Amino acid sequence: MSSTHTRILRTQRLVEMLEQDAPLLARRVADLAPEHQKSAKEYAARLASCARAELERLIQEDSFWNSDDFTAEPAD
């Protein structure tokens, strides 16, 4: 398994965890002042957005390297 593929899997897990945590985050910050709730939710949204962007970048990088054919050509 390539290093890029490992990073893709880890980033996918992070994105999934952040998406699954959204309802729980709302409960965790419910007791905070409204401005702190907003700040925490905005931070979580930015983190998820960055993780999704990184995932897309890694997938594109992986597909770029996998699309190139590095097989050796026979000498004439």
Image: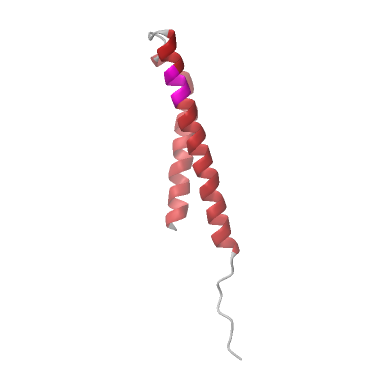
Q: Mainly helix, strand or loop, the magenta region?
A: helix
Q: Is residue 21 visible?
A: no
Residue at left 47%, top 22%? 42
How many numbered markers are drawn? 0
Q: Residue 41: image x %, image y %? A: 46, 20
Q: Residue furthest bottom?
A: 76
**Quadrant of the drawing holding the N terminus:** bottom left
Q: Residue 44: image x %, image y %? A: 45, 26
Of 64 and 12, which appears nearest the observer?
A: 64
Residue at left 48%, top 19%? 23
Q: Is residue 8 visible?
A: yes
Image position of 19 with respect to 36: above or below: below
Q: Residue 60: image x %, image y %? A: 57, 51
Colour setup of the view: secondary structure
Kindly indicate the quadrant of the structure image that contains residue 64: bottom right
What's drawn in magenta, residue-wise?
39-43
Of 43 and 70, which appears nearest the observer?
A: 43
The stretch drawn in magenta includes residue 50: no
Image position of 9 with respect to 65: above or below: above
**Quadrant of the drawing holding the C terminus:** bottom right
In the displayed structure image, the side of residue 71 where residue 29 appears, left or right: left
Residue at left 48%, top 47%? 8
Residue at left 51%, top 33%? 49
